[in-house]
Amino acid sequence: MMPDLGKYAFTVLAAYGASLALLLGLIWMSLRAARRAARDLAEVEQRNG
């Protein structure tokens, strides 16, 4: 169910799209950093183990 946005439809939908893209980018960067940290920790533990 989409409300009638009139002449502002493109602006509003573009803002939603940009927000979604930024959120997905942040999630991707966070997951990548977590994987890197886990790999680095495993490497340090293996050296010190």
Image (cartoon, rainbow, N blue to C red):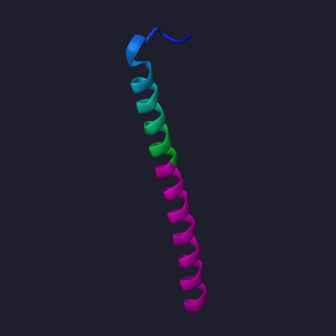
On the image, the x and y values in percent for residue 45 come to 56, 83
> For this rendering, which residue is in front, 46 or 5?
5
Q: In the image, 46: left or right of 7? A: right
Q: In the image, 13: left or right of 43? A: left
In the rendered image, the residue lying farthest to the front is 7
Measuring 39% from the left and 14% from the top, which residue is drawn there? 7
Image: 47 above or below 22: below
Measuring 59% from the left and 78% from the top, which residue is drawn there? 42
Quadrant of image for the C terminus? bottom right
**Is residue 36 inside the magenta stretch?**
yes
On the image, the x and y values in percent for residue 22 come to 45, 45
**Is residue 28 inside the magenta stretch?**
yes
The number of numbered discs placed on residues in the rendered structure image is 0
Quadrant of image for the N terminus? top right
> For this rendering, which residue is in front, 30 or 20?
20
Q: Quadrant of residue 32?
A: bottom right
Highlighted magenta segment, given as a residue range: 25-48
Characterize the magenta stretch by its predominant secondary structure. Answer: helix
On the image, the x and y values in percent for residue 17 come to 48, 34
Image: 33 above or below 21: below
Measuring 44% from the left and 38% from the top, which residue is drawn there? 18
On the image, the x and y values in percent for residue 29 come to 50, 58
Q: Quadrant of residue 10?
A: top left
Measuring 54% from the left and 78% from the top, which residue is drawn there? 40
> For this rendering, which residue is in front, 5 or 38?
5
Image: 37 above or below 21: below
